[in-house]
Image: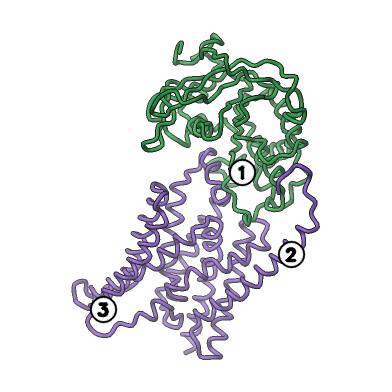
Amino acid sequence: MISILFNAALAGVLSSILFGVLGSVVTVKRIAGLAGAVSHAVLGGIGMALYLSATGKVPGMPPIAGAFIFAILAALIIGVVSLKAKQREDTVINAIWAIGMSVGVLFMAKTPGYTDPTSYLFGNILLISVRDLWFLGILDIIVLGLVWRFYPQLEALSFDAEFARVRGIRTNTAFIVILMITAVSIVLLQTFVGIVMVIAMLTLPAGTAGYRAKSLAGMMTGATLYSLLFSTGGLAVAWIFDAPAGAMAVVLAGIVFLGAAALSMFTRSAKRRERVIPPGEKP
Amino acid sequence: MNDTVILDFNRVSFSYDSVPVLDSVSFHLHRGEFTVLVGTNGAGKTTVLKLILGLLEPSAGEIRLFGHQPATGRAKTGYVPQFADYDPTFPVTVRGVVRMGRLTPGKRWFSAEDCRAIDRALEHSGVSDLADRPYSALSGGQRRRVLVARALAAEPELLILDEPTANMDSESEARLFETLGYLKKSTTIMIVTHDTGFVSSLTDVVLCVGDRKSRAGTRDIVRHRTEPATNAPPERFGGSAARVLHNSALPDSCCGGNGTGGDR
């Protein structure tokens, strides 16, 4: 039991770095909808892997392998559509969201024996394996390394992609790389909070940190600390009340985010009343 | 190509999918010129800028910027977009935004020279006192001046400004044109504006994205003369203005030093 709890706590810490750093990028790049579609499409891959493994077509295929395949495919399709076909972008994103889930449900229905999708949809941090922890740790190092090395470019293309392109930044390549890393991260992070709620943990801590941050780096640091608070807090409260840890972490994150949003609205409206706009200038 | 020609727009055509915008359009800019590209809303002015900057590809013709393809030549260009794709919650200070003007693809750290260039850009744009404030806390006019500073931070040889005075009060506009007047000595400047009647008296060349020249809906770019205007609104341009003479159409070769397109 101690080792299960230790693994869960370590998973919370390692996940928090991805939730904080990658979540800030997802938030400022405004690609939460895209990330949401990728995360839901992952169920198709999990269902496919369970079916292929159970029917002996690909013996021993782990669900995470199917999840990776579907996540990367979904990210590629969404990325290309987002860059090339602006007019139907939202339709394609929502279609991939729904098709991925439907394919997952169909595969699970045809998989011999009973398959419970609950742990995939809502996560179970107590089931996290040592292999998952290694994957999370390696991905943390890769994401932190890339963000450290390309921070000025990442900040510029997130703020104004067109200007960044004029400065010679390969914004389309960077966008696809960001989507791919987000897709891989989603597969690993869904073990903690599940497919349905992973997008909440990618956006709520970053959104909360964004209210006080003065830079993207500050937002990433703040979001990581918030994620750590929500993950460990969620785990502790869930332990006390014998409730799912992932759902508890998301509820905590939601309460704090809504509180921060209300405080920010109140502060802004107070400042607006005090501020004098120069004559002839639009706010 | 003439040494002083830094931009040669040679028989360029462009369409948005099936909607033609430009058909075999030619013009050129000389080093040191102050050019104003005028045209009504939707005429295609921003399209022309994006072609110059290599953000769009022409369907026919050739664009040479500093003797290179736009994607290469734009490194010497400063650009102030009409609408920055701006997220009001993006956490960045004014100095952080201006620093983006010094960015290159592989750069990780900013040098002392970069910092000096950023300080000069902040000062020339009149936003030094706002340097440490969050960008989101500024008014629309202040944000425009910060974007001008971001373009100036690159110390560009060609400065392109798309509707730079949008959302600006008259004081900010006067400060902007004061800055542009100072820069005119060392920088080629191109401004895009929907005001087709008057331009700043700093202007050397007026290019007008004109009426539709064909049934297909493409537009031409015509070089016009100007004359001093005495009845221009006094608060415009921070100084004297010139009237655009739309009934005059000069050939692209009128300066005697046009680009590769020949007498067009």
3D distance between C-alphas at marks 1 and 2: 29 Å
Q: Quadrant of residue A90?
A: bottom left
User: In the image, what residue type sits under mark 3?
Assistant: Ala
x%, y% of residue A272? 75, 57
- Chain identifier of the green chain: B
Relative to A190, B5 lies left or right: right
x%, y% of residue A141? 50, 62
Asked if badge 1 and badge 2 are on a common chain, one would say: no
Residue occupying the point 53% across, 86% down: A238
User: In the image, what residue type sits under mark 2?
Assistant: Thr
Chain A image colour? purple
Residue occupying the point 46% across, 80% down: A125
Relative to A226, A99 lies left or right: left
3D distance between C-alphas at marks 1 and 3: 52 Å
Give the crowd class for mark 3: few <14, some 14-19, many >=20 residues within 10 Å: some
x%, y% of residue B165? 67, 36
Query: Can you tell which mark lies on residue B100?
Result: 1
Q: Chain of mark 2?
A: A
**What residue is disc 2 on?**
A267
Q: Chain of mark 3?
A: A
Q: Check the image and report above or below for B248 versus A276.
A: above
Q: Nearer the viewer, residue B115 or B15?
A: B15
Q: Are marks 3 and 2 in contact (CB under 8 Å)?
A: no
Query: Can you tell which mark lies on residue A127?
Result: none
**What residue is disc 3 on?**
A109
x%, y% of residue A149? 54, 52
Nearer the camera: disc 1 or disc 3: 3
